[in-house]
Amino acid sequence: MLAGSRIEEVRNEVTELAQAVPGAQEFMQTMVKLLHHRMLKYNWVGFYLLEPGAKPPMLVLGAFEGAMTPHTRIPLNQGICGAAASSGQTVVVDDVSKDPRYLACSLETKSEIVVPVFVHGKVVGELDIDSHFAAAFTSEHQDLVQHCAKLVGKKMETAGQ
Ligand code: SME
């Protein structure tokens, strides 16, 4: 099977899931399982959510699939995760060993993508994916992960966080 068609299939599955699942938490839990299971190079898939009212702001590990990470709480001035949440921009790192911001989760991780989740225009969290393969997150993958993060934001807007 071509990689492109797998991405298209998974995009459709996630879109259908958004319609089938009523709550945001359940949506995130099912989504991380689906992405981890279906996308063979997505070796760790998880959400970090901004802790409500925390000062300074703090990202807290939410639903995830893959090995347990030591980074369950990440301030916004640390890690690739902090960079994505504080800038509101997708961050893609093709070789984590060359990025000084990187906080190691697994020794096997080679590349990472972090996409912010927005609710009414504000960052509320992010979808973080690690791969054991260098440069795994090509533009097609970025589109898929951004689509997933957008659906979660929309679900939170309609169903509540
Ligand atoms: N690598 C992330 C930390 C989270 S773990 O990958 C699950 C970072 O640099 O922020």
Image (cartoon, rainbow, N blue to C red):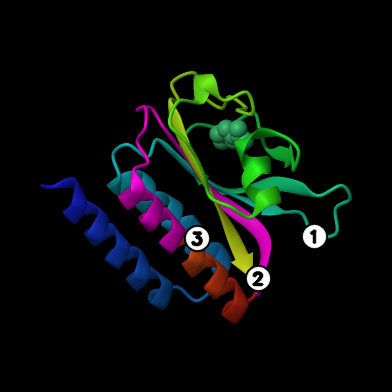
Residue 77, quarter of picture: top right
* Label 3: which secondary element: helix
Q: Amino acid at mark 2?
A: Gly
Does the closest atom of ligand 1 sit within 8 Å of the Cβ of label 1?
A: no
| Mark with earlier residue (2, 3) | 2
| Mark with earlier residue (1, 2) | 1
Residue under the image location 42 percent in, 54 percent down = 145
* Label 1: which secondary element: loop
Tag count: 3
Query: According to the image, label 1 marks what residue?
Result: 52
Residue under the image location 66 percent in, 75 percent down = 120
- Disc number lying in front (2 or 3): 2
Quarter, ligand 1:
top right
Q: Amino acid at mark 1?
A: Pro
Query: According to the image, label 3 marks what residue?
Result: 149
Residue 137 image offset from top left, x and y in percent: 37, 41
Question: Relative to 71, is 115 above or below?
Answer: below
Residue 5, quarter of picture: bottom left
Residue under the image location 43 percent in, 57 percent down = 31
Report if residue 20 lies within the magenta region: no
Q: Which residues are magenta?
A: 120-147
Q: Distance from label 3 to label 1 (Cα)?
A: 19 Å
Residue 131 image offset from top left, x and y in percent: 40, 33
Q: Distance from label 1 to label 2 (Cα)?
A: 16 Å
Crowd around label 3: few <14 · some 14–19 · many ≥20 (10 Å): many
Query: According to the image, label 2 marks what residue?
Result: 121
* Label 2: which secondary element: loop
Task: Assign the C terminus to one quadrant of the image.
Answer: bottom right
Question: Relative to 160, is 134 above or below?
Answer: above
Q: Amino acid at mark 3?
A: Ala
